[in-house]
Image (cartoon, rainbow, N blue to C red):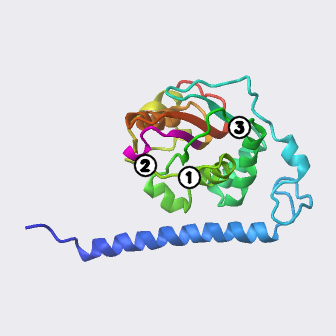
Amino acid sequence: MPSVPEKGGERGFRRAEIIERFALWWAKGRQALYCGVVSSCFLCGASVGTGSTLCAVCWASLPRHAATRQRALAGVGRVWVGFDYVYPVISLIRALKFGQAVYLAPTLAQVWQEFPPPVRLPDCVIPIPLSRQRWRRRGYNQALELARPLAQWLRCPVQEGLSRLRATLPQAELPRAARQSNVAGAFRASDRLQGRQVALVDDVLTTGATLEAATAALHQVGVGGVDVWVCAEAPVPDPF
């Protein structure tokens, strides 16, 4: 006889869903409020137009990543990097990632528009997914917030189809030698992506272990190709 779900379990699941939806609504509400009333630069406090987050001087001073320093990642066609992960880019990305400053994502994503469009445009844009537990705590996925303006610029949809099979330890807390094993086999891709050219998006590239694990999952279902778009690249840490 099939088992019947416990009512307490159902209530717990529904409660978690409500918390997730409220957290996302709160983050989006903060973004709308900020973009509607902000009139000062996030970094220097100078007066800016309504809806702006950085003044022209601060935006121009952000350290762009040199196009000649191309990273090679397994299974990836090209890696597009906007900034070097140094101050003040570190402050901006940490505010986006940990400080509920989702309104910074469209500003940071503008750096990609300084590149010439790729020769082969993607069919879809896919953000690196968060685990359910981390999404519940944060209320949003910073990679998704960066993916949306990129998709608008590339004129293709943001598409679901990549999920985490398990929660992993934060990569930033691990030495280089442990990062690959931490995310190995952590992703699953949908068969619906077969044959599609994918733009895979994340906030920061360090060792590349997370992006390579996600790319491997995409190739397992036969995608046409994968390019990676990251907001910033950090120095690779020591092995141990």
Residue tagged by mark 3?
A: 117
Q: CA separation, marks 1 and 2?
A: 14 Å
Q: Is label 3 in a helix, a strand or a loop?
A: loop
Q: Does the magenta stretch include residue 192?
A: yes
Mark 2 Cα shell of 10 Å, populated few (<14), some (14-19), many (≥20): some
Foreground mark, 3 or 2? Answer: 3
Dot 2: element: strand
Residue drawn where x is 52% and y is 36% of the image: 211
Q: Alpha-carbon distance for marks 3 and 1?
A: 17 Å
Within-10-Å neighbours for mark 3: few <14, some 14–19, many 20+:
few
118 with respect to 2 (left or right): right
Q: Can residue 101 be seen in this view?
A: no
Seen in the picture, residue 131 relative to 100 is either above or below; the reply is: above
Indicate whether residue 138 is drawn in magenta.
Answer: no
Tell me which residue sits at (55%, 63%) in the image: 139
Q: Residue 118 carries which label?
A: none
In the foreground, 151 or 233 = 151
The quarter of the picture where residue 36 lies is: bottom right
The answer to whether 119 is drawn above or below residue 20 in the figure is: above
Q: What residue type is labelled 3?
A: Pro
Sequence-first disc among 3 and 2: 3
Closer to the N terminus: mark 1 or mark 2?
Answer: 1
Locate residue 32, reporting x and y percent.
71, 69
Q: Which of marks 3 and 1 is nearer the N terminus?
A: 3
Q: State the residue in front, 62 or 235.
A: 62
Residues 59 and 137: in front is: 59
Q: Give the range drawn in magenta.
A: 191-201
Secondary structure under tag 1 reads loop
**Does 222 sit above or below residue 46?**
above
Callout 1, which amino acid?
A: Val
Residue annotated with mark 2? 163
Which residue in the rendered view is the most extreme toward the left?
A: 1
